[in-house]
């Protein structure tokens, strides 16, 4: 365990939040209480493992179990947690213009016996809402929007492209099923209402809990950003940048960031390039075989007899290669290229998740620094107040009171009374000065009035200002102590929840890549089997072609001669 782990405010062994360079004697943050327990926002115990970092390998098994529930918020919740293997299906994509001035594509979602319809922008708003509601969870991605290049190439037909719509159907269906199998997100009622065809999605977006989301989730509780009973001390928390460095970073999350960056570079770099190139070349290979098969079938019409049948059968074998290759490319795109693209998006999502946790850690350290600075400021103000009181007592006149040298020692009541009597004596007024009264210069009165007003605005009683500063500083310290306690609590919750969801994601990734590899192997096996059958049939037809009549007979074998080799003699052997 490194030294930075000793400073870790979410240490799993001791849960200590201590810093040798700072004093926290006035606020107990050694063991901040956990947020209020909410079963729908807690990961199961089998997914939490703070000792194993994100890059660790997970067993090859599907550990995602549906949590047992006895109370359901709605019919969709009952369907999703019925204990059966329920799969959400997108059965169709239809073009419509209901509620809009221009036509758009709506996707038909079937959950059990329930059917709902949503357009792409509504899927997008669902995901963005879940990201704000659950800032410590990995929210699955949705397919990306069309690029400007797609719109430029297809000239307004990009939204109606059949291949793009089919791809969106598959990836949006994957998105919904990942939500349905998540141990926390599957309990979210906003998700249930999205699957309900009788609820207006616009109404959902403008009603709680989405309408209660704060503008800045960094100044809201990590466990529930919509909590209306959250402490007002959250407003005192700073708003740090994701690039702000940490004094005491957690090594676990440094490892997770390094692994995620490495994974993202590999997925979006070499893997994406070779996948795109493979799809392109297989597609060109299939297209070439389509043209070759058509040419062979046309050529067979110009021949007769066994030769015509053999050419036709060869063309059919080439056509079978074209069809099997086309199917191979489709399966490769669906079962390999699209999941790889999804995991490239997952890497960006995890980066943002780790950035949120980084900002929460920076927020804790900045609050701690601000608290220490305010405490030092309070000490200076109290020291100045003590010195001012001593100076005032020393200049008080005859009844000078010798105040104690320490601010903790208060003067006695007798000393204070003598001091008050000495400063209460006021000498008699000498009366007006007739000479000065008659020496006024015209216009000077206005200047004197202005000067008096300005001095009244600028001159502030230093004693009052000092005491006000002490009072305000104490209030700020009290608020910062509460804010520091909340920051420590949020950091502890964020770290444990993010680590648990990273572990769950790692198991999911291992299982998904295993399924991707198996699907690729099955696709190539089926491709080879279909081609082998087609070409074996073509070979049988080709074998029925008789030998060419002009074929030269096989040369007879010459008898072996016992004559001496002259070349051997010439070479001296």
Image (tube, rainbow, N blue to C red):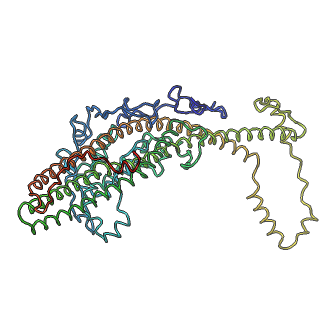
- Quick check: can you spot residue 244? yes
Identify the residue shown where x is 40% and y is 38%.
Answer: 501
Question: Is 35 left, or right, of 64 in this rendering?
Answer: right
* On-image quarter of the N terminus: top right
Question: Is 400 left, or right, of 337 in this rendering?
Answer: right
Q: Is residue 486 above or below residue 115?
A: above
**Residue 183 horizontal/vertical position (percent):** 33, 37
Q: Closer to the camera, 417 or 394?
A: 394
**Residue 23 horizontal/vertical position (percent):** 65, 33
- Quick check: can you spot residue 28? no
The residue most toward the left is: 305
* On-image quarter of the C terminus: top left
Identify the residue shown where x is 22% and y is 61%.
Answer: 289
**Residue 527 horizontal/vertical position (percent):** 21, 49
Identify the residue shown where x is 92% and y is 61%.
Answer: 433
The residue most toward the right is: 435
**Residue 526 horizontal/vertical position (percent):** 20, 46
């Amino acid at each position: 365990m490194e030294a930075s782990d000793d400073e870790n405010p979410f240490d799993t062994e001791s849960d200590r939040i201590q810093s040798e360079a700072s004093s926290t004697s006035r606020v107990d943050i050694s063991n901040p209480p956990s947020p209020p327990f909410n079963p729908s926002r807690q990961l199961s115990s089998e997914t939490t493992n703070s000792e194993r970092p994100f890059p660790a390998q997970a067993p090859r098994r599907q550990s995602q179990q549906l949590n047992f529930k006895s109370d359901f918020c709605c019919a969709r919740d009952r369907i999703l947690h019925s204990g059966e293997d329920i799969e959400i299906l997108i059965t169709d994509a239809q073009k419509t213009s209901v509620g809009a001035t221009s036509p758009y594509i709506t996707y038909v979602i079937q959950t059990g016996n329930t059917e709902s319809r949503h357009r792409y922008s509504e899927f997008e708003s669902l995901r963005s809402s879940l990201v704000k509601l659950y800032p410590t969870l990995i929210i699955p991605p949705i397919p990306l929007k069309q690029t400007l290049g797609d719109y430029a190439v297809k000239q307004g037909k990009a939204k109606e492209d059949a291949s793009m719509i089919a791809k969106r159907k598959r990836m949006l269906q994957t998105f919904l099923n990942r939500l349905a199998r998540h141990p926390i997100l599957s309990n979210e009622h906003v998700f249930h209402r999205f699957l309900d065809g009788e609820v207006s999605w616009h109404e959902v977006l403008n009603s709680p809990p989405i309408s209660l989301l704060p503008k800045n989730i960094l100044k809201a509780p990590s466990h529930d950003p919509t909590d209306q009973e959250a402490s007002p001390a959250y407003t005192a928390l700073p708003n740090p940048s994701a690039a702000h460095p940490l004094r005491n970073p957690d090594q676990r999350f440094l490892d997770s960031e390094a692994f995620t960056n490495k994974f993202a570079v590999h997925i979006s770099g070499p893997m994406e390039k070779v996948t795109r190139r493979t799809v392109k070349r297989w597609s060109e290979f299939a297209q070439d075989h389509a043209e070759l098969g058509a040419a062979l079938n046309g050529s067979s019409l110009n021949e007769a007899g066994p030769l015509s049948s053999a050419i036709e059968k060869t063309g059919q074998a080439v056509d079978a290669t074209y069809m099997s290759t086309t199917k191979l490319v489709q399966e490769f795109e669906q079962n390999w290229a699209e999941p790889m693209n999804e995991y490239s998006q997952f890497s960006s999502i995890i980066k943002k998740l780790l950035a949120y946790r980084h900002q929460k850690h920076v927020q804790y350290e900045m609050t701690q620094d601000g608290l220490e600075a305010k405490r030092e400021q309070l000490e200076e103000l109290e020291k100045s107040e003590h010195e001012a009181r001593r100076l005032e007592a020393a200049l008080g006149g005859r009844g000078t009171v010798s105040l104690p040298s320490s601010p903790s020692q208060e003067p006695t009541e007798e000393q204070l009374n003598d001091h008050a009597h000495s400063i209460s004596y006021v000498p008699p007024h000498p009366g007006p000065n007739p000479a000065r009264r008659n020496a006024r210069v015209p216009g000077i009165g206005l200047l004197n009035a202005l000067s008096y007003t300005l001095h009244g605005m600028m001159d502030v009683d230093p004693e009052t200002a000092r005491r006000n500063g002490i009072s305000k500083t104490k209030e700020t310290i009290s608020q910062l102590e509460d804010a520091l306690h909340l920051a420590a609590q949020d950091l502890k919750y964020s770290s444990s929840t993010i680590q648990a969801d990273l572990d769950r994601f790692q198991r999911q990734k291992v299982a998904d890549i295993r399924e991707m590899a198996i699907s690729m192997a099955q696709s190539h096996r089926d491709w080879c089997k279909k081609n082998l059958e087609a070409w074996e049939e073509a070979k049988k037809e080709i074998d029925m072609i008789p030998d060419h009549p002009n074929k030269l007979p096989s040369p007879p074998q010459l008898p072996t001669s016992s004559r001496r080799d002259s070349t051997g003699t010439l070479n001296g052997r």
